[in-house]
Image: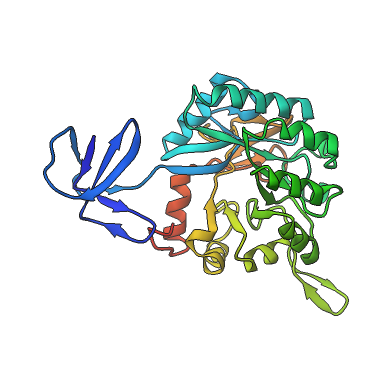
Amino acid sequence: MIFTNCRVILADAIHDDLDVVARDGKIAELRAMASQPGETIDLRGNFLAPGFVDVHVHGANGHDAMEANADAFRAICDYHASGGTTSLLLTTATAPFSEILLALTQIGKLREEIPQIAGAHVEGPFISRDQAGAQNPEFICEASAELIGCLLEHRDVIKRITIAPETKGALAAIKEFSAAGIVVSGGHSNAWEEEARAALENGMRSLTHTFNCMSSARRRGTKRVAGLLEFALSEPKICCELIAEEHHVSPALMKLAYCAKGGGGISLVTDATAGAGLAEGTTFQLAGKECIVKNGACFLAGAGTLAGSASRVIDLVRAMIRSAEVPLPHA
């Protein structure tokens, strides 16, 4: 199939003189626009971009990845496909460890059947109680050798894991997961600058939902010392997740992240939970906690704490362009 007469969005610029050739559902070739034999779709000057990749997705349409079944996974993927996401990491929550392992097992079994599933992101349980956010603190635990070993049995499924660098056992865990080819992301953390640096030295290369549930600059003695946030923004080796929607970060913070990291140093993520796609006022569950959709966002019921988002990646791209004035190819 050939897509023609389109504005092709690539990392460097928007190209008005290219055809996009697709085979078996994937981009096979970019070539100069010309009359070619074959099935052709005229996009009449509209934009065309590669599918989005979302590395932090808990749920959508009333379903959560922790349900660990095909119906839930398909519902989640279908909703996010409506916003242009063609690959995603189903993200587990801080929950009983046996439930996390079950979800990983099912993701591994079903990813061939549901091609949008690129693997799993394990968010918790190796996080800080002080920065738990909507995660259930009851199930937060230290990164013991036994639990690390259990997760590494799923190394072919786990593509990403969130760990608070300052917690007990974290540095050893970061080193082991990194050595196994799993991207380690700092998050839900109260780390000081030196703890964040130690994590970097042991393999941490990402930051989970930048600005949210993490330490920032604090006074120690006579001076201000960076937290995990400032350390990550200043470190070129770290890529920052960003939930670029108004409930999580203001336009100024979106712009700050872009100025610090550039387009290549930011990964837009939805952190969408089961409330994504549901009507206003609908309740849903997140790791055993009741949540509600309110004002277009997801909250813990009866509290002002955000419980992920109700967004799709296309919504975040639009926000980066409109609110943070980021050029379209970089967004």
Residue 96 appears anywhere in the view: no
Depth check: give the residue in front, 78 or 134. 78
Task: Give residue 301's quadrant in the image.
Answer: top right
Horizontal side, residue 164 vs residue 248: left or right: right
Where 279 falls versus 134 (above or below)? above
In the rendered image, which quarter is residue 157 located in?
A: top right
Question: Which residue is found at the position 56% from the left and 68% from the top?
Answer: 260
* Residue 48, x across and y down, in percent: 30, 47
Please give left or right for residue 86 compared with residue 195 in the image: left
Residue name at image x 78 percent, y 45 percent = 173
Q: Could you say where residue 27 lies in the image, as x and y percent from the top left?
A: 33, 40
Q: Is residue 320 left or right of residue 7?
A: right
Residue at position x 80%, y 65% from top? 194
- Where does residue 313 sit, x and y in percent of width and height? 47, 45
Q: Nearer the viewer, residue 211 or 22?
A: 22
Count up the numbered dots.
0
Residue 244 x/y as whole percent: 53, 53
